[in-house]
Image (cartoon, rainbow, N blue to C red):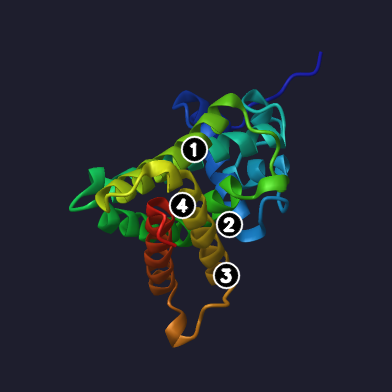
Amino acid sequence: MWSHKTSPQEKRGYHHGRLKDALVEAARALIAERGTSGFTLTDAAKLAGVTTAAPYRHFADRNALLDELARRGFDMFNQRLKGAWNEGQPDPATALRRMGSAYLAFAREEPGLYNTIFSGSDLPPPSADTEDASNTAFAILEHATSAVLRQYGAPTGEAHRLAYEIWAMAHGIATLSHAGHLREPDCDPSLLLYGAVNSLMEMAVRRALGTS
């Protein structure tokens, strides 16, 4: 019967329970460099310093590794958003703008994770845990937009739409910035998003109050 001989690197990884984390970090680095379609499970194994058979102890295939990376990415993303929201202090509108800055910072600082969680059709169908983490991210944003509408005395019926509008704007600016299209002095990503969020909030309040 075929048997797998464990290398010294693998022994250290398994002994300390780090092999799974090492493979996830390897995938994160590879995706930051090549995109979600630019790596294989073998690539991740090589970067992690283990044999090509080792990943199968934790992941059935490349898609399983991508899903785990996406789940962890959303968890980190959610923590960033919650931290920026800070329970809506000092007021919801200010906190929502701060969340926009946190969104751009995450995309800039964690390209491997950002590309994984927002690659859409390049990713396998998410597991239940990953889908829950994704839904949590949007729920955090929608909670914030509801609070902003209440701050301005408006009904919260527009919160869902406003959350999608801000998400779309933030994603578009982050994508353009990553591609190098916002290098002109008057195209600072943070300032662009700040102005866009202000405009979107104003329009949402007008819609909610029936004054637009």
Residue 56 picture location, percent across and down:
68, 27
Confirm or deny contact between disc 1 and disc 3 (CB under 8 A).
no
Residue 205, label in figure: none
Mark 1: few, some, or many residues within 10 Å (few <14, many ≥20)? some
Above or below for 46 versus 2? below
Above or below for 24 versus 13? below
The residue labelled by disc 1 is 72
Residue 65 picture location, percent across and down:
63, 35
- Sequence-first disc among 4 and 3: 4
Q: Amino acid at mark 2?
A: Ala
In this orientation, which residue lies closer to the viewer: 163 or 74? 163
Residue under the point 66% across and 58% down: 34
- Using the numbered discs, state the Cα–Cα distance from disc 1 to disc 3 in whole angstroms: 24 Å
Report whether 205 appears left or right of 131. Answer: left
- Using the numbered discs, state the Cα–Cα distance from disc 4 to disc 1 in whole angstroms: 26 Å
Confirm or deny contact between disc 2 and disc 3 (CB under 8 A).
no
Quadrant holding the C terminus: bottom left
Residue under the point 59% across and 42% down: 49
In this orientation, which residue lies closer to the viewer: 160 or 193? 160
- Sequence-first disc among 1 and 3: 1
Residue 176, label in figure: 3
Q: Amino acid at mark 1?
A: Arg
Element assignment for label 3: helix
Mark 2: few, some, or many residues within 10 Å (few <14, many ≥20)? some
Q: Quadrant of residue 181?
A: bottom right
Residue under the point 40% across and 60% down: 211
Mark 3: few, some, or many residues within 10 Å (few <14, many ≥20)? few
- Using the numbered discs, state the Cα–Cα distance from disc 4 to disc 3 in whole angstroms: 21 Å
